[in-house]
Image: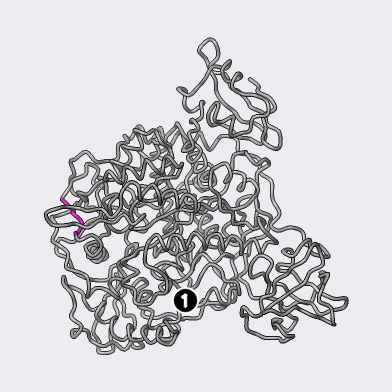
């Protein structure tokens, strides 16, 4: 579609659809086009309200378009049941005594000796002459003796924009320009230090020379870029195989700029031409000066926004600005510099939502989008490598097994894990046919083939469902008016609505999302992966949903035989299974299957499971990363999760940011609270974290909240402040548990590879000392040692610690000593 037509469509959509979508409150059926009143978008403005954000039109008509994101800080985003007396068997199985025991166990874990850390360089040392054609990146060089200073901004590996002292770019044919295009991207070639440059089919010539020995100099103009505002070298391990420290985000959507057809999301995490191109608003937002951003309006509740991104960032990014890029690579770099060491990037799509959105250039097929986003991850890795001086030198490292991830983290870099969260994985939807039943659109062979495909792409973590029932599992559903709209889309996808029945979970919590007994269409915001778009663009095309019995509600659709086959396939490929978004019935059956298989590769990544499931995930040797949300809400979630810890496994906790997934981020507590975050503060490994500067914008967690991904180190400091204020000393405890999160994730993943749990926490895993010594031989790798005798209880620098049985039935502690490369040197007891 030509830009002019695209913008015209956006303007027409703004003029014609916002009224129909937002005025349709109280309507169970479609809205006729003739009933849509015209709204002057520039006169829509806020009015006072104690709940949500009503708007009024130029004629004074009130339009309620936003309510509180009520599940952001809930222990489970998958349930909002009432407090009535409940009396059935689905419940949190832990007793008060078990919870106290679990909390005491975690307290003992914190008292264990921490691994020794060192630091790693951020980039390679810049020499007088670059080591190779990649080392020019972000450097100031002259190409000839006495020549002008030139700044080299990498656009990819070995390619550059070359900027002169007047901030103009060198272009082919000896021209200079202020605009970056493919015609002025220079490819560096040549062995060693003698380089040639070509762009647009022309070779670079200066003073008659076309072969250059670049020499470091000064006087270059500054190339625009977001700052990091963290000083100090990133922490690293003393050895590649020791216990790790850091933070883990197990649920974020870094490539979401491609989903929903590629035009619903504004900005992207990188661009070859830099931040001034990467962080700009959508054309349909800028065309209307920020007042035609219908999806943004529905999600944030604000009638308009300043469309200017870089360098002012007046209105976006922000915690509730959900259509704008939040994971720009420099912001991700700041989180890494502040201590993050695992980043799970989930490839995401929703075909029905994509089809409803009127502007698109990508395929709406879930699997097409997943393939595209996977390729983007490798392209971003290359781009970051280019900024850091060459292949493998960047902080962003895509990993495919826990052993590789441990090495990456102990090198001081960020282990990036690829995952999937989509509504129709592998094309496994179904159609409900009257008189026949559900007819799946896939079979076991399709699943196996595509599991192999995504595994080859690098996918290692996966959910089975997201927003719709599919041929694998029933869904927990969305609640409120978002649920009404998603349920209508579920009908379009499958030919049937959610089969929500009345249920009474014993704990009053563990049910699926509550549905309206008498549905209305309003604009309540939840985790609005579907609701806001459907509401703005598709309400008129969605069918009226059925009436449901009184809450609580449970979806009668559970785990199918194809779902069981998929879980078994994930386990066979050592992939991590995430039961989030499944119906209570399906999740319970899935965890029964996990129990029966004895499989440990399981995670609940962003609080879309229920309290009956969390203790089971821990008991299966899994790990949990609750939805980040507000810092105050996360501290409360942490306290409850302590009572579910399982003493057989290493304990640590992470978070699921869900940023770019149309999930709201943490709001600020305010600068006037008695315990604000004070800048600068010390981060993990001794780095100094200051207020982040991005162009002209200065971010402060106290007043901005988690406006973008770079503020997660600040959010963790806010957790410490809040926990300490609630109970002295708890700030150090929550941060310690967060710093242990990556190790908990890696140990869970190791067990998915068949490595037995450690023999000190699990007496049943202990072998005799004689057998241990017999099975361990000099020269074995750390992985071979673990395969022989299980996970170590301690991994401190050059030694692993195990427990074994002595001849008298007692316990003896064993140390395996390794050399620097991770090969066994000795076994001591």
Query: For mark 1, what is the residue?
Result: 315
- Between residue 705 and residue 239, name the one nearer to us: 239
- Between residue 21 and residue 184, name the one nearer to us: 184
- Between residue 729 and residue 660, name the one nearer to us: 660
Relative side of 220 to 499, left or right: right
Q: Would you place residue 530 above or below residue 166 in this image?
A: above
Specify the segment rendered in magenta.
496-501
Q: Is 461 part of what is drawn in magenta? A: no
Question: Image quadrant for the N terminus?
Answer: bottom left
- Between residue 37 and residue 628, name the one nearer to us: 37
SS majority, magenta: loop
Can you give x and y, in whole percent of width and height, for residue 72 in the image? 36, 59
Residue beneath the point at 52% across and 14% down = 810
Can you give x and y, in whole percent of width and height, for residue 15 in the image? 31, 86
Residue placed farthest to the right in the image? 145
Q: Is 498 part of what is drawn in magenta? A: yes
């Amino acid at each position: 579609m030509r830009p002019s037509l695209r913008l015209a469509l956006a303007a027409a959509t703004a003029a014609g659809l916002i009224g129909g979508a937002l005025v349709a409150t109280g309507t169970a059926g479609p809205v006729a086009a003739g009933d849509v009143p015209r709204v002057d978008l520039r006169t829509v403005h806020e009015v006072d309200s104690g709940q949500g954000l009503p708007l009024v039109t130029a004629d004074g008509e009130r339009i309620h378009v936003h309510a509180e994101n009520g599940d952001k800080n809930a222990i489970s985003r998958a349930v909002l049941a009432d407090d009535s007396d409940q009396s059935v068997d689905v419940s949190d199985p832990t007793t008060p005594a078990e919870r106290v025991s679990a909390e005491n166990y975690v307290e003992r874990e914190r008292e264990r000796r921490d691994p020794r850390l060192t630091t790693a360089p951020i980039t390679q040392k810049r020499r007088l002459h670059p080591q190779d054609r990649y080392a020019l990146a972000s450097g100031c060089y002259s190409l000839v003796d006495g020549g002008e200073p030139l700044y080299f901004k990498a656009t990819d590996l070995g390619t550059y924009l070359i900027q002169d002292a007047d901030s103009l770019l060198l272009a082919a044919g000896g021209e200079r320009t202020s605009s970056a295009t493919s015609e002025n991207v220079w490819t560096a070639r040549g062995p060693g230090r003698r380089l040639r440059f070509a762009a647009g089919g022309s070779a670079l010539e200066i003073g008659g020379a076309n072969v250059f020995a670049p020499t470091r100099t000064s006087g270059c103009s500054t190339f625009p870029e977001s700052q990091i505002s963290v000083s100090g070298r990133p922490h690293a391990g003393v050895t590649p195989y020791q216990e790790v420290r850091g933070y883990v985000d197990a649920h974020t959507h870094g490539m979401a700029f491609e989903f929903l057809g590629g035009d619903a999301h504004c900005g992207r995490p990188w661009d070859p031409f830099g931040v001034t191109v990467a962080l700009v608003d959508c054309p349909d937002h800028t065309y209307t000066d920020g007042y035609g951003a219908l999806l943004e309006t529905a999600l944030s509740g604000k009638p308009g926004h300043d469309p200017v991104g870089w360098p002012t960032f007046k209105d976006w990014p922000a915690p509730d600005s959900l259509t704008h890029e939040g994971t720009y690579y420099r912001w991700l770099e700041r989180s890494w510099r502040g201590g993050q060491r695992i980043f799970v990037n989930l490839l995401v799509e929703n075909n029905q939502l994509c089809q409803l959105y009127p502007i698109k250039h990508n395929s709406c097929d879930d699997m097409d989008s997943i393939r595209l986003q996977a390729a983007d991850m490798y392209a971003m890795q290359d781009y970051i490598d280019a900024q850091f001086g060459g292949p493998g030198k960047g902080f962003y490292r895509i990993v495919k097994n826990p052993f590789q991830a441990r090495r990456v983290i102990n090198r001081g870099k960020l282990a990036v894990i690829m995952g999937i969260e989509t509504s129709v994985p592998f094309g496994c939807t179904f159609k409900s046919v009257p008189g026949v039943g559900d007819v799946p659109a896939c079979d076991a062979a399709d699943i196996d083939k595509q599991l192999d495909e995504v595994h080859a792409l690098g996918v290692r973590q996966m959910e089975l469902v997201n927003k719709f029932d599919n041929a694998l599992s029933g869904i927990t559903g969305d609640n409120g008016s978002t649920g009404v709209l998603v349920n209508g889309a579920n009908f379009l996808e499958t030919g049937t609505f959610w089969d929500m029945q009345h249920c009474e979970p014993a704990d009053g919590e563990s049910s699926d999302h509550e549905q309206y007994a008498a549905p209305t269409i309003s604009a309540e915001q939840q985790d609005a992966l579907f609701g806001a778009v459907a509401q703005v663009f598709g309400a008129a095309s969605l069918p009226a949903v059925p009436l449901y019995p009184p809450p609580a509600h449970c979806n009668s659709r559970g785990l199918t035989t194809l779902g069981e086959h998929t879980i078994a396939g994930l386990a066979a490929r050592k992939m991590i299974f995430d039961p989030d978004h499944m119906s209570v019935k399906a999740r319970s059956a899935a965890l029964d299957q996990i129990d029966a298989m004895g499989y440990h590769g399981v995670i609940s990544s962003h609080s879309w499971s229920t309290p009956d499931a969390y203790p089971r995930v821990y008991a299966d040797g899994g790990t949990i990363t609750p939805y980040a949300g507000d810092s105050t809400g996360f501290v409360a979630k942490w306290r409850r999760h302590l009572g579910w810890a399982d003493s057989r496994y290493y304990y640590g906790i992470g978070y699921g940011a869900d940023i770019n997934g149309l999930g709201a981020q943490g709001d600020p507590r305010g600068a006037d609270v008695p315990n604000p975050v004070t800048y600068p503060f010390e981060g993990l490994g001794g780095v100094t974290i200051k207020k982040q500067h991005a162009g002209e914008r200065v971010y402060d967690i106290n007043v901005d909240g988690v406006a973008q991904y770079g503020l997660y180190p600040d959010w963790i400091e806010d957790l410490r402040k809040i926990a300490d204020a609630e109970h002295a000393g708890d700030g150090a405890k929550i941060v310690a548990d967060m710093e242990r999160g990556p190790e908990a994730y890696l140990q869970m993943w190791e067990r998915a590879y068949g490595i037995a749990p450690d023999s000190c926490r699990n007496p049943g895993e202990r072998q005799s000392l004689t057998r241990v010594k017999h099975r361990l031989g000099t020269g074995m790798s750390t992985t071979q040692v673990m395969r022989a005798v299980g996970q170590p209880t301690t991994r401190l620098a050059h030694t692993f610690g195990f427990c074994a049985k002595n001849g008298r039935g007692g316990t003896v502690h064993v140390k395996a000593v390794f050399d620097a490369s991770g090969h066994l040197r000795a076994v001591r007891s």
